[in-house]
Image: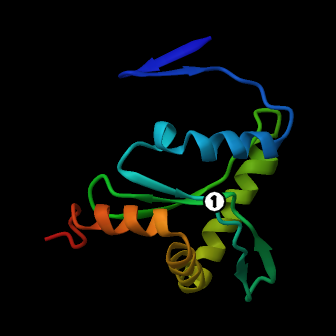
């Protein structure tokens, strides 16, 4: 099956494992998330000290469509149970992010500073968005 969105054509693909899916998302990030975004393939642990558990998202997305937003990206195979596996994982991210958001932001800044292409794209895109809502 093929899907066409604007000029982009997508083909349904079944992946044998998450690693192959993650590589495809990385290679097609601009087509998947749009030109006004930066996909950061950073496996950074988000830890909740209070509840004592940690998760590692598959990546992060900086969304520049309106005001800049940070999204957590989790790439999952369709064979994974959407409630037991994906839902629980996203709930853990939500509870951890409020406590660990500063550390995550520091990691993202460090990643950008060490990746010239990402840093240049970020600097170019940040000039085009409103940071504050009036």
Left of 30 or right of it: where is 19? right
Whole-percent x, y for residue 63 in the image: 40, 56
What sort of colour scheme is used for the picture?
A: rainbow
Quadrant location, the C terminus = bottom left
Of residues 91 and 56, the one nearer the viewer is: 56
Left of 82 or right of it: where is 94? left
Secondary-structure class at tag 1: loop
* Residue appearing at x 55%, y 81% in the figure: 110
Whole-percent x, y for residue 20 in the image: 78, 40
Q: Residue furthest front?
A: 116
Quadrant location, the N terminus = top right
Residue 103 in which image quadrant: bottom right
Sort mark 1 into few (<14), some (14-19) or many (20+) by Cα contacts within 10 Å: some
Q: Residue furthest left?
A: 134
Query: Quick check: 8 above or below 118?
Result: above
Q: Residue furthest bottom?
A: 49
Whole-percent x, y for residue 88 in the image: 75, 57
* Residue appearing at x 30%, y 52% in the figure: 65
* Residue appearing at x 41%, y 42% in the figure: 34
Left of 129 or right of it: where is 29? right
The tally of labels here is: 1
Residue with the mark numbered 1: 41
Query: Quick check: 36 above or below 8?
Result: below
Q: Residue furthest right?
A: 16
Left of 128 or right of it: where is 63? right
Of residues 93 and 84, the one nearer the viewer is: 93
Query: Quick check: 78 above or below 66?
Result: above
Residue 126 in which image quadrant: bottom left
* Residue appearing at x 73%, y 88% in the figure: 50
């Amino acid at each position: 099956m093929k899907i066409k969105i604007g000029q982009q054509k997508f083909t349904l693909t079944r992946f044998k494992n998450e690693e192959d899916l993650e590589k495809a998302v990385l290679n097609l990030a601009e087509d998947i998330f749009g030109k006004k975004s930066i996909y950061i393939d950073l496996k950074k642990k988000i830890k909740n000290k209070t509840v004592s558990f940690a998760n590692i998202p598959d990546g992060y997305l900086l969304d520049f469509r309106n005001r800049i937003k940070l999204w957590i990206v989790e790439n999952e195979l369709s064979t994974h149970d959407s409630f037991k596996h994906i839902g629980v994982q996203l709930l853990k991210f939500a509870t951890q992010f409020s406590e660990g958001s500063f550390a995550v932001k520091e990691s993202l800044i460090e990643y950008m500073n060490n990746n010239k292409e990402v840093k240049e794209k970020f600097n170019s895109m940040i000039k085009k968005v409103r940071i504050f809502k009036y």
